[in-house]
Image: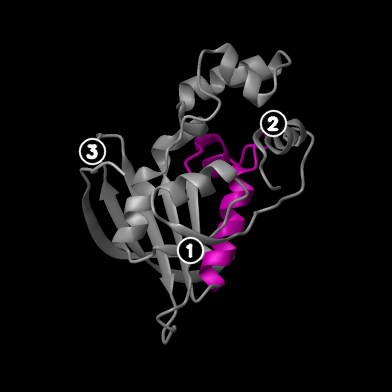
Amino acid sequence: MTTLMVQGPVVTKLPIDWRGREMMLDAYAYQGGASHEQVLALLNHAADTAPDTVPVVRIHSGCVTGDIFHSLRCDCYRQLQLALDEICTAPVGLIIYLPYQEGRGIGLYRKLQAYKCQDDGADTVDANVEIGMPIDARDYELAAWILKDLGMATIKLLSGNPLKRDALANAGITVAQCIPLISPPNRFNERYLKTKRQRMAHDL
């Protein structure tokens, strides 16, 4: 793995509303080498947890349309909520939130360009190709760096994405288990989920 220029962490507490309950999480902010590479890591660590406990980890790509506005075109909001359920009930749970990975790394503007291609009949893979973008432009080197910084070289990964699993493994993280986050399809994202399964080998 290449040497990363990372600032942080800045550490504080973040109370969140989780399923109508108050939940206090440890918040870690990191700044990557590029100005847009700002990362939030939220940790739940129960008291008296055994030191060899394997943490449950979600690495979540930011999705303005899904995470904030609850878009039905993707499953990002549902995956985020399911991940928080796992993290807030695990002895050790962590979510690494990567806001700059919008649209599988192509950004919000180009993501909506791809949406327009989907409106005209393309699936999510072909839509990215049509606008001259990679099918998936994300990398997880910074996320792996943060996991190591937090002492989490072995994890249970909340994901069905084989590229994410393999990228973490290549960066020196042992993925002891992959736990897919599965939500039922709706009429707006049914093809999106089918494409992830059939053309991107996601376990959904």
Mark closest to the chain's N terminus, 2 or 3: 3
Was residue 67 drawn as part of the magenta stretch in this picture?
Answer: yes
Q: Secondary structure at mark 2?
A: helix
Q: Which residues are magenta?
A: 61-89
Inter-mark Cα distance, 2 to 3: 32 Å
Inter-mark Cα distance, 2 to 1: 26 Å
Residue type for callout 3: Gly
**Residue drawn at (22%, 47%) of the image:** 6
- Image position, residue 196 (x, y; %): 68, 36
Q: Is residue 130 left or right of residue 120?
A: left
Q: Is residue 11 left or right of residue 99?
A: left
| Residue in the foreground of this view, choosing between 131 and 108 | 131
**Residue drawn at (44%, 84%) of the image:** 50
- Image position, residue 153 (x, y; %): 39, 63
Q: Nearer the viewer, mark 3 or mark 1?
A: 1
Q: Mark 2 sits on what residue?
A: 199
Residue type for callout 2: Arg
Mark closest to the chain's N terminus, 3 or 1: 3
| Residue in the foreground of this view, choosing between 20 and 182 | 182
Q: Secondary structure at mark 1?
A: strand
Q: Nearer the viewer, mark 2 or mark 3?
A: 2
Q: Mark 3 sits on what residue?
A: 33
Q: Mark 1 sits on what residue?
A: 155
Label ID, residue 182: none
- Magenta span dominant secondary structure: helix
